[in-house]
Amino acid sequence: MPSIFQRLFAPSDPRDAMRTLYNAIVAEGRQPHWYVEGQVPDTMDGRFDMIVAILAQALMRLEALGAAQESVWLTELFVDDMDGQLRQEGIGDVVVGKHIGRMVSALGGRLAAYRAALSGEADLGGVDLGEAIARNLYRGEAPSADALAHVESHLRSRWVRLGCVSRDALMAGDLG
């Protein structure tokens, strides 16, 4: 346990301000309805994909609020969490970096796909939300129409609600 002097004089981690939001994102991504009604594969990959879908929405909202630094900190928390998860699974130091690189690349690709789909760019020839979900959450495996509709409606509803959430409320874990 750190001494009182260590706690008083230790530099604070600016990412701490984003931990509540990150924990809310992970908790939402683990909700059973995504895996039962939404039929997202209840696997490590499926859970990663679901958390990334919700994380992407939070990052887009932070971007819209002009909170670029907070977006960086939130992404860093995600990377640290994924690093820890890989190490818990027994992935060694030699290849953890490669796995993290692929995960960050996946986040970037999904962020672009969800941004285009939710911003209406699909109307301009981009991918619509259902297509982005099918490609990224189900990795090309066709889900049932009901499952896809469940996930799409919940993500779209969250996106609409997030549009009304203030910066402070978002950072306090309010995902809309």
Image (cartoon, rainbow, N blue to C red):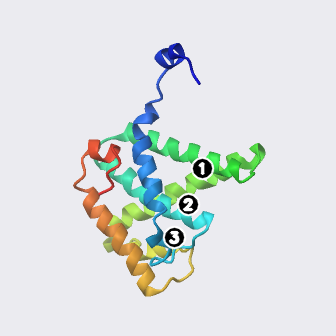
The residue tagged 2 is 48
Q: Is residue 144 above or below residue 8?
A: below
Pointer 3: residues within 10 angstroms few (<14), some, or many (20+)? many
Judging depth in this view, the residue of 30 and 168 nearest the camera is 30
Q: CA distance from mark 3 to mark 1?
A: 17 Å
Three-letter residue code for mark 1: Met
Pointer 1: residues within 10 angstroms few (<14), some, or many (20+)? some
Q: Is residue 31 above or below residue 27?
A: below
Q: Position of residue 103 (x, y in %)?
A: 59, 54
Q: How many marks?
A: 3
Image marks 3 and 1: residues in contact by CB distance under 8 Å: no
Q: Position of residue 87 (x, y in %)?
A: 70, 47
Taking 150 as reference, is 36 left or right?
right
The residue tagged 3 is 137
| Mark with earlier residue (2, 1) | 2
Q: Secondary structure at mark 1?
A: helix
Q: Position of residue 158 (x, y in %)?
A: 32, 63
Three-letter residue code for mark 2: Phe
Residue at the (74%, 51%) spot, across then down: 91
Judging depth in this view, the residue of 111 and 6 nearest the camera is 6
Q: Please state, as top left, top right, bottom left or bottom right, where the N terminus lies in the image.
A: top right
Image marks 2 and 1: residues in contact by CB distance under 8 Å: yes
Q: CA distance from mark 2 to mark 1?
A: 9 Å
Residue at the (38%, 57%) spot, across then down: 57
Taking 70 as reference, is 104 left or right?
right
| Mark with earlier residue (3, 1) | 1
- Residue 82's label in the rendered image is 1
Judging depth in this view, the residue of 125 and 166 nearest the camera is 166
Three-letter residue code for mark 3: Leu
| Mark with earlier residue (2, 3) | 2
Residue at the (52%, 73%) spot, across then down: 40
Examine the rendering and report whether any part of residue 31 can be seen.
yes
